[in-house]
Image: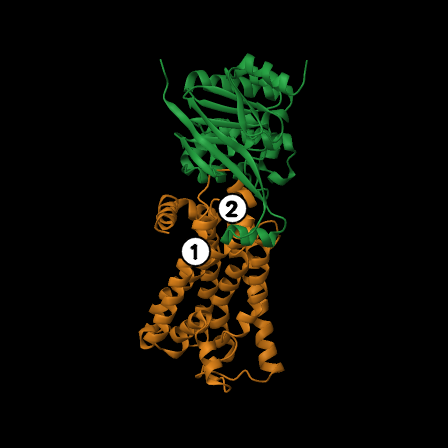
Chain colours: A green, B orange
Amino acid sequence: MQEKTVIRFSDVSKVYYLYKSSKQRLMGTLFHHAKCKTNRAVDHLSFEIHQGEAVAFLGRNGAGKSTILKMVTEVAFPTEGEIYVDGRVGALLELAAGFDPEFTGRENIYLKGHILGLHDKEIAALEEDIVAFAELGDYIDQPVRTYSSGMKARLGFSINVNIRPDILIVDEALSVGDEEFKRKCVSRINQLLTNEHMTLMFVTHAVGVAREFCSRGIVMNKGRAIFDGPIDEAIARYDQLIGKK
Amino acid sequence: MIRAMKEIVTDHIHNITQIFKLAKADLIKTYRGAALGWWWAVIKPCMTLFTYWFAFSYGFRSGKPVEGVPFFLWMAVGITPWFYMSEMLSQGTESIRKYKYMVTKMKFPVSIIPTFVSVSKMMVNLVLFLIVMILFWCWGFAPSIYYLQIPFYVLMSFLFFTLWAQFASLMAAISQDFANLVKSFITPIFWLSGILWRTDNFTGSVWIRRFLNLNPVTFLTSGFRDALIFNKWFWETPKKCLYFACWLVVLWVLSLWAYKRLRKDIPDVL
């Protein structure tokens, strides 16, 4: 049975403008008059992801993987082409999934919930699960600025999997947790994938983790998808790309 | 332009409860972490007020009663709304920069950031203004029917400075120079707006006096004084109201333009 398409990229490009100075950037963004270098982070990319799929994006640094995830999350906008996204997106971009450093972990749960449009009651219902899953102990009532990067990732991950997103986006977040927490996350993601029919987009350099729950892999190089297919073949292609024998 | 307006308006309608929740969070954040906490919201303005009062009454020897109202009260009415305005000029302008993580780390309607910051600053200011009104009563000036227009002026300054922040916070996110430019103008605006002296009494060139009177901050502060002290209705000076309305339209267009131009570039720049 063919599932419905939840993410569609149609000929998407993303160009970053690299200005020499902030003055030129001001002129450039306001009046499009300044000269600058450009970096095509994503280059005429098209793909579709169906509901329930778990897709790993592999590639070297600067291949455009994170830019793709940012565009799906709508914190970056394509320069050309169109993106279609259907459903609530839970995103863990670059570890600290948008916490306010001055607030405690618990307050950040509420803040995040409010931003996502949940009511106090709904958040209160989820709060216990989130706190329990994150395993932060007494730190849950300490300001987030005192957290280590691992702790931030745990809280961010815990919030994002517990708000029941339709699409979960994970960017490298699993690489900082310890083995036990990583296992817990993997099993939780697997559970969401099979039971809730969630869609997963995953960026990592640890191919082992990708293999554990992704069935499909897209290998990126210089903004283009050079391979799109079964995960094992994708990993082989990626290993070839980075020159691993 | 129209699409930008539609987007901003729908974002505000859909997130109206979030705006108040985030404003509350912003308030908590501002005043927490100090032993005196909330008191700082009152202590800081009081210090400013007393300093100016002292300098004017004893330094310049010019603190005469205005229309029978003690100079201290006259000054308090003008300076209290200014606390909100100056906060908006500085922190309203920096709001998107301050809440960077909402822009770069998650999907979030950027246009509501300046609005909830404005709501948060306004909340503090309303409490301060209430204190001023209580002071008036304690001094023996009972509330009059003219007090009814206070909500009008509160709404006007809220509108003006929220629109301002809509425009300026986007500009400041793109360029730190813009933020610095605005900051360097705060003190001149304060002294040229008839907050501490009556621009009507300006004896130099007529043109300079007109210029001073056409400053939107002058319109707002003298409005609050009209309500509490001079017993004047705002419709008695329709020209000034019309002029202020023009300011609102200009800011509104500027904010739409900035949104349309910059919204999609902001996350890449921050």
Image quarter where the C terminus of chain B lies is top right
Q: Position of residue B190 (x, y in %)?
A: 54, 71
Q: Amino acid at mark 2?
A: Ile
Alpha carbon separation for disc pair 2 and 1: 14 Å
Is residue B208 in sight in this rendering?
Answer: yes
Classed neighbour count for the residue bearing mark 2: other residues with Cα under 10 Å, few (<14), some (14–19), many (≥20):
many
Q: Which mark is residue B266?
A: 2
Classed neighbour count for the residue bearing mark 1: other residues with Cα under 10 Å, few (<14), some (14–19), many (≥20):
many
Q: Are marks 2 and 1 in contact (CB under 8 Å)?
A: no
In depth, the one of B66 and A159 nearer the eye is A159
Task: Identify the element where label 1 is drawn.
Answer: helix
Q: Which residue is mark 1?
A: B255
Q: Amino acid at mark 1?
A: Ser
Which sits earlier in the primary sequence, circle 2 or circle 1? 1
Q: Is residue A159 above or below residue A207?
A: below
In depth, the one of B1 and A94 nearer the eye is B1
Q: Is residue B204 above or below residue B154?
A: below
Q: Residue furthest bottom?
A: B203
The chain letter for the residue carrying disc 2 is B
Is residue B27 in sight in this rendering?
Answer: no
Q: Residue at x 53, y 70 (%)?
A: B189
Instruction: Count up the numbered dots.
Output: 2
Do discs 2 and 1 share a chain? yes
The chain letter for the residue carrying disc 1 is B
Task: Identify the element where label 2 is drawn.
Answer: helix
Q: Residue at x 55, y 33 (%)?
A: A93
Image quadrant where residue A123 sits: top left
Q: Position of residue B79 (x, y in %)?
A: 50, 70
